[in-house]
Image (cartoon, rainbow, N blue to C red):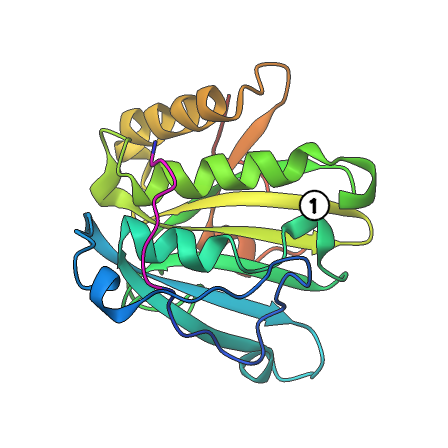
Amino acid sequence: MLEPAEGDPVNHSDKLPKDENEQPFETEPAVAELVAKHTLENKWTLWFYENKSRIWEDNIHEVSSFDTVEDFWCLFNHIKRPSQLSNQSDYSYFKNGIKPMWEDKKNSAGGRWVIKLPPVKNNPQIDEYWKNIVLSIIGEIYDQHSEIHGAIVTVRSKGTRIAVWTNNASKDNGSNIMAIGRKMKEILGAQNEKIVYESHIDTANKKRTFTKPLFFV
């Protein structure tokens, strides 16, 4: 897990919902130059989705990218938590260059581990779940971390979902998929919760209100 560290703030999009309780701070230039930042193995991008248009692409916005521990915390600590978001909103952290959408060719053969939770107003634990999942993917703590593309928290009035996206939903890759699912459940401390794995192809082509999972833990 990554631990909070001080560093220079990153620039944020005006569309990102900022936490009104956070106070701006200043860093003396001479001091900032002396901060030794800790580089992450990959560069990551935060995306924010808010359903305001019928055109999906108009609702999602690339907010900011980072590749150090310090820049991650400067971003994460200065935006609203999932429990503070309005319904029909998502946060996504994805490896830089990969969009949080099925249509991205890097995602098309993949799938996602999903945990379904109550609406955020009834479950303050969601913020902690989300933080731990984000830290686990950018900290590359999974043995199969090269298969992980990102994570999404989806806030809706009927419930909240946290998903970890992977790049290979083939049944032949089942051992790696299951290892990721078990690790995700361990990180969440959600031993009594059921999490399921769905392929993006099945989800995109579903004819019912649910997708039949390929795996579950």
Residue 19 visible here: yes
Amino acid type shown at disc 1:
Thr
* Element assignment for label 1: strand
Horizontal and vertical percent position of residue 139? 29, 39
Badge 1: how crowded within 10 Å, few (<14), some, or many (20+)? many
Kindly indicate the quadrant of the structure image that contains residue 206: bottom right
| Residue linked to disc 1 | 160
The stretch drawn in magenta includes residue 25: no
Name the foreground residue: 85 vs 21: 21
Q: Which one is in front, 55 or 138?
A: 138
Instruction: Name the residue located 43 percent from the left edge and 43 percent from the top edge.
Output: 134
**Is 54 left, or right, of 163 in this rendering?**
right
Stretch of the chain drawn in magenta: 2-8
Question: Quadrant of residue 155 in the image?
Answer: bottom right
> Residue 56 placed where, x, y %?
59, 78
Name the spot of residue 43 as percent of width and height, x first.
24, 59
Residue at the image point whose x is 69% and y is 73% from the top:
51
- In the displayed structure, would residue 25 be above or below residue 195? below
Please, which residue is most extreme toward the top here?
191
Q: Residue at x 76, y 35 (%)?
A: 123
Q: Main secondary structure of the magenta part?
A: loop
